[in-house]
Image (cartoon, rainbow, N blue to C red):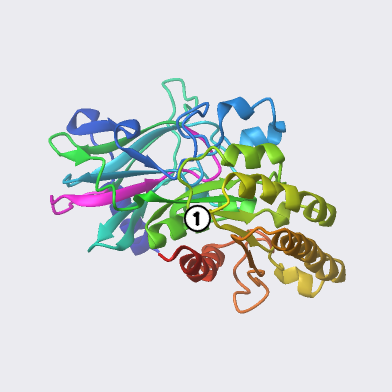
Amino acid sequence: MLLALALLGACTAAVADEPADTWKYVDAQDLRVINKGWDNTLRHYTRIPANLKDSVRPDLWERAQCSTGIGVRFATDSKRIGVKYKLLWDTHMIHMADTGLKGTDLYILEGDSVWRHVNTNRPYVKKDADGNKTKDVESTYVENLDGKMHEYMIYLPLYDGVNELFVKVDKDADITSGDPSIIDKNRKIVAYGTSILQGGCASRTGMAATNILSRELNAEVVNIGISGEGKMDYCMARAMNDIPDVDLYLLDPVPNCTEMMCDTLTYDFVKIIADAHPDTPIVLLEGPLYPYSRYDSNFGNYLPRKNAALRRNYDRLVADGYKNIYYVESLGLDGPEDDGTVDGIHLTDLGFRHYADYMKPRLRAILGW
């Protein structure tokens, strides 16, 4: 036990922050911000346009202020890399780790195509001179790098917002926005859905399914997963039409919708997008069959009925002549990945790995990537 504590102390000391004058703080806005759908947001790192505030439910608006999926791309030869940011809320939940809620992940590109996780910051919030929390977080991810230019990526918090973010590098280091073909700026998927899509309950930010898919498809994946509020609001479909240069829309709203909503909203929600973008593929993903639905007879009957309603509307769209709409059956979380959820609904990192592995070949087949 004493050895474990000593090792923990050594690890903590290895990434301890040094005086600010030994660092260079680079505003992420001067680098490359990725996986963001719109420019006209209230803050730099929120996810829906500011002009929707009066058109959506308050809960939808608030949860869209989370920085979910948004990342920062850069290249540097610094021997140390860290981060400094200011949280919007400093939130906490009983079933999700703070590292996923409000931490950040650093990844490095190995070779020309493999992203490796370097480290995650523990989001300890600083206190002012009076002992009051400030919502300021500052951490060092890694030291003793080789001093060569490498490509990096930082993923922002999944269930909190970020008012500002700075990448910390050595004072004399070079830092650029990186190679634009890495997380290719000319490839874009827009993913719309619920808390599962938003990243609940990944242990760290890079493990949200959209972030895994972004790395492994070498594409920007815009995350519009809105916890409890992925209810196929038509204003959201119209807003998604304004995101430029979309290669594919992935729609995963069933977990937040009732059977009636799946039956009455799906057709027009998809039609709004399909009419505006007839040549862009739209993927409809069934809702998952949660593990407990094997034992709870009510949900065992109800969840398949929701998916059946979604399928009826897909069939109707196809019958009405829409050509680029695809239907994907349930993830099947009650199958071999029984340990894929935290609470029977929201995913563990294993569950997100399963989600990404399930969707990746299907998206590749549609897109030809």
Using the image, determine if residue 315 lies above or below residue 66. below
Secondary structure mainly formed by the magenta segment = loop
Expressed as whole percent of the image width and height from the top left, the position of residue 152 reads 28, 50
Residue farthest top in this picture: 130
Determine whether the residue tagged by mark 1 lies in a helix, strand or loop. helix
Determine the image quadrant of residue 302.
bottom right
Q: Nearer the viewer, residue 216 or 76?
A: 216
Up/down of 211 relative to 227, above or below:
below
Camera-side residue of 338 and 19: 338
- Three-letter code for the amino acid on which mark 1 is drawn: Thr
Residue 325 in percent (x, y) is at 62, 60
Could one spot residue 200 in this view of the protein?
A: no
User: Residue visible at 85% across and 70% down?
Assistant: 301
Q: Is residue 159 within the magenta segment?
A: yes
Q: Residue furthest bottom?
A: 336
Q: Which residue is mark 1?
A: 210
